[in-house]
Image (cartoon, coloured by chain):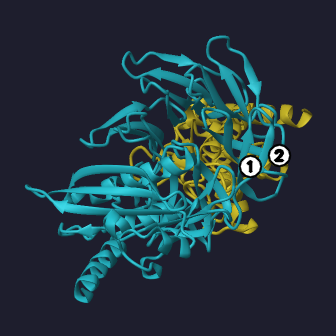
Amino acid sequence: MQNMGWNKLFAVSLLSLAITGCASSGGTTDEAATTDTAMEESQTQAVPGSPGVDVVTEEQAEMAANPLLDQTVVYFGFDRSEIRPEFKDILNAHAAYLVANPQASVTLEGHCDERGTVEYNLALGERRADTVKRYLVVQGVNPNQLESVSFGEERPAVVGSDDSAWSKNRRTEINYQAR
Amino acid sequence: MMQRLFFILGLAFSVFAKAELTIEITQGIASSIPISVVPFQTTASTSSGDVLDDVIRNDLQRSGHFAVLAPNDMLSHPHTEDDLYFRDWRLLKQEYVVMGVTTELANGQFQVRYQLFDVFNERELLTQTLKGTQQQIRDVAHRISDAIYEQLTGIRGAFSTKIAYVTTNPERTRFNLSIADSDGAREKIILSSKYSIFSPSWAPDGKRIAYVMLEDAGSRVYLQDITTGKKELISSNKGLNSAPAFSPDGNKLALTLSKDGNPEIYVVDLTTRKWLRVTNHYGIDTEPNWMPDGKHIIFTSGRSGNPQIYRKNLETGYVERLTFEGHYNARARLAQDGRFLVLVHQAQAGGDFHIASLDLTRGLLQILSSGTYLDESPSVSPNGVMVMYAAKHNKRSILAAVSVDGDVKFLVPSKSGDVREPAWGPYPN
């Protein structure tokens, strides 16, 4: 609970940072937001002469450079939809990014392994997408940035009928529609 | 004679090779009834390659209730009563003999007259004359099988029924919703899509099928007219649109929507398009199925922590839990006027998934399936005797069938790719 409060505070402070960033630079763009991990070495910089591209604040660059953002899948136990503690850091990183970049949006795709019934798994997949959605919203993300969809057991990440394949298929994928 | 036999065999083989599904009987009942179906006398040309009495023998054999004598093992091939010597059939320990004569009629039609005899009592039990076109040989054969089955077991035959199922290539890039005879013959693709198709549900009139298509934006429920192929969008709300099930009168569809934030059961009147919310719980509620009275809906709910089967009275709103034995009980279907539930059952966490039956009056749960793996999607024949389900077998998705009493078992593998989501159609009109 204490931790969550801190996260909220963190999210709010990030949000204010983002707002200040926007106010000073006149808004970040998709291009600026998609800076990848290479930014860690190189310094933040504007692209000269291209209109609509602005200076990226150091905080935003740091955030976008967060390697946790490269992790876009969280996994679940069988017939479970609650978030496992080991995935909270990943979700916190995405939450921070989404808060700092209000123009960014993601689709949360819930998936299941092949065991159990097709329809119950479709509902369970939605639960998995929705628990991630709720978690991100609690971290301060605007629900309008989040869309959830369930693919049930229909789109496995790994084909196979063993524990290793199943554990990789019980997942929610965070797919950025806009950065 | 030999040449003609080869000709027929050749034709039969080509038809067999074309069919997507085949049937491998794995278990019949020990006390199966010995019956002989003598090759029918025929003057009609068999342009379709289907042989009437072959289809009947296969039907009866597949039911598991009969031990069908191969024509080669018969002492004679009589076609009329004058040639029928009961002593011969007693010698072969046969209890019943079927013989028939087909004659060609004008304009491509044919007629068949068949008789069923009781060998011990030396009397005729059944005589019927049926007419059909060359394309209807299988329909006529299945009708004859239905009549023989009902005469000898007291249960209406379901050989004339159709099954719907979904086939997919190993890459899962193409999904076909198909309809075939209950023996897998005469497969017809009614819908082909790059999107996953599941939960086909027959209208009681057998003329329409509702199903779910999982598009990129999520699940959608469609209703398709089988004869015209016309496809109609029934539900595309935000969230889930899934698990359609026709009411017994065919006027309503129960389905699962999560537009209000959580998977719940709804009923839509197909004429007025008025929606009614049936369940209201924060747990998952899905997989509705109507009781024959049209006043109760059974469904799967995760409200107790794991999926279990519940029944809701639509008039009083009373909800009752039906399954208590097992860790995971889901997707129940009703058999024998609602006296039995057939469902997907996992006894304990981490255990295998089987098809089980639950006797609702005695509360007795019986595991029906064995030899297959990850069993799911049970669908009951309209006479309540057989359950077809999807399973993994030798790393492929196949259909399998088991009788509601667990005694008869057969596999229905596909020639190519995977086959899933069987739905047994209603009796033909």
Q: Quadrant where the N terminus of chain B lies?
A: bottom left
Kindly report the distance in space between the C-alpha atoms of the residues bearing marks 2 and 1: 7 Å
Query: Which numbered circle lies on residue B29?
Result: none
Q: Amino acid at mark 2?
A: Gly
| Rendered residue at 74%/34% (across/down) | B360
Residue beneath disc 2: B326
Q: Is residue B292 above or below residue B274?
A: below
Shade representing chain B? cyan
Q: Is residue B180 visible?
A: no
Q: Which chain is yellow?
A: A
Residue B74 left/right relative to B225: right
Q: Which chain does the residue under circle 1 lie in?
A: B
Q: Nearer the viewer, residue B380 or B213?
A: B380
Q: Quadrant of residue B90?
A: bottom right
Q: Quadrant of residue B167?
A: bottom left
Secondary structure beneath disc 1?
strand
x, y percent for residue B416: 44, 72
Query: Which numbered circle lies on residue B345?
Result: 1
Secondary structure beneath disc 2?
loop
Mark 2 surroundings within 10 Å by alpha-carbon count, few (fewer than 14), some (14 through 19), many (20 or more): some
x, y percent for residue B206: 38, 39
Q: Quick check: do tags 2 and 1 share a chain? A: yes
Q: Nearer the viewer, residue B192 or A107?
A: B192
